Amino acid sequence: MKKWRKIRTATGAVAVLLFIFSLALPVACAISASINPPKVTIKAEYLQDVERSIQVENSGGKEITVSLMGDVKGVELEFGANDFALSPGGSKDVPIVFKITQQGYFGGEIAVKISEVGAGEGRIAPSIRFPCAVAIDATDAVTPASTPSSSPTPFHTTEGKEAIFGSLIYVVIVIVIVIAIVSLGLYAKFGRRR
C-alpha cells in the first residue's frame, strides 16, 4: 500500500511540474535570433575607416526589436542601422564602419540585444544579448607590421551563435526532471526487492 502511495505522489509531482513548465514554455520560446558572422576580424592601417556588416536574422515566431552597442578599444563604431524591428523569419544586414584611431592589436565586442516588440508596455519580456567578437590589427602605413606593443585580447566565441533561448533550455530541464521523478518512482516500486 505504501508503494502505491509513493508512486501516486511521484506521478502527481510530475503532473504539477509539467503543468508549470507548460505555462512557462510559450514565453521562453517567444524570441530567438542568430547573427552572422560570430566574429569580425580586421587587419587595416591606422587612421583608416573599414566597413563590415553583420546579418541579424529573426528565427523565432514573434516580431523582435534589435539594438546594437559596441565596445572596441582603439576604434570608433558607427552602425548603419540600430534599434530596428524584424518580423518572424526576417533578416537584415547591418553595415558597421570601424574608424581605427590607434595602432596595435585590440579586441572587444559588438553586443546585439534582441527583445520582443511591445515589451515595455508594463510587462517583463525576455531579451537576449549576443556578443559578436571583434579583433583589430591596426598597423602603421609607413612601417611594416612588427611585434605589437600590447598582446591581443583573448576572445571566447561560439561558432554559429544560433540562440534558441528558452525552448531548448526548458525542454532539457523538463526532460531531466521527468526522468528523475520517474526513476524515483520506479526505484520506490521495484528497487527494494531482494
Image (tube, rainbow, N blue to C red):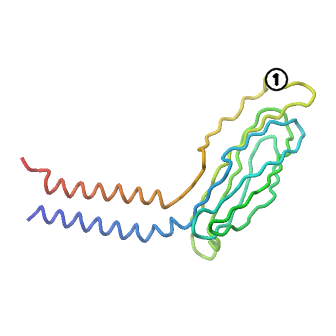
- Residue 48 location in percent, x, y? 89, 41
The residue at 60%/50% (across/down) is: 161
The residue at 74%/64% (across/down) is: 83
Residue that extends furthest to the bottom in the rendered view of this protein? 121
Residue that extends furthest to the left in the rendered view of this protein? 194
Number of numbered discs on residues: 1
Q: Is residue 64 above or below residue 139?
A: below
Which residue bears the numbered disc 1?
Answer: 146
Taking the image as shown, residue 98 lies to the left or right of residue 26, namely right
* Front in this rendered view, residue 8 or 87: 87
- Residue 128 location in percent, x, y? 60, 59
* Front in this rendered view, residue 194 or 102: 194
Residue that extends furthest to the front in the rendered view of this protein? 89
Q: Is residue 21 above or below residue 150?
A: below
Quadrant in which the N terminus is drawn: bottom left
The residue at 73%/39% (across/down) is: 135
Q: Residues within 10 Å of mark 1 (few under 14, many from 20)?
A: few
* Front in this rendered view, residue 141 or 87: 87
The quarter of the picture where residue 145 lies is top right
Secondary structure beneath dot 1 equals: loop
Q: Is residue 29 above or below residue 134?
A: below
- Residue 136 location in percent, x, y? 77, 38
The residue at 69%/35% (across/down) is: 153
Taking the image as shown, residue 52 lies to the left or right of residue 156, namely right
Residue type, numbered disc 1: Ser
- Residue 11 location in percent, x, y? 24, 66
Taking the image as shown, residue 20 lies to the left or right of residue 160, namely left
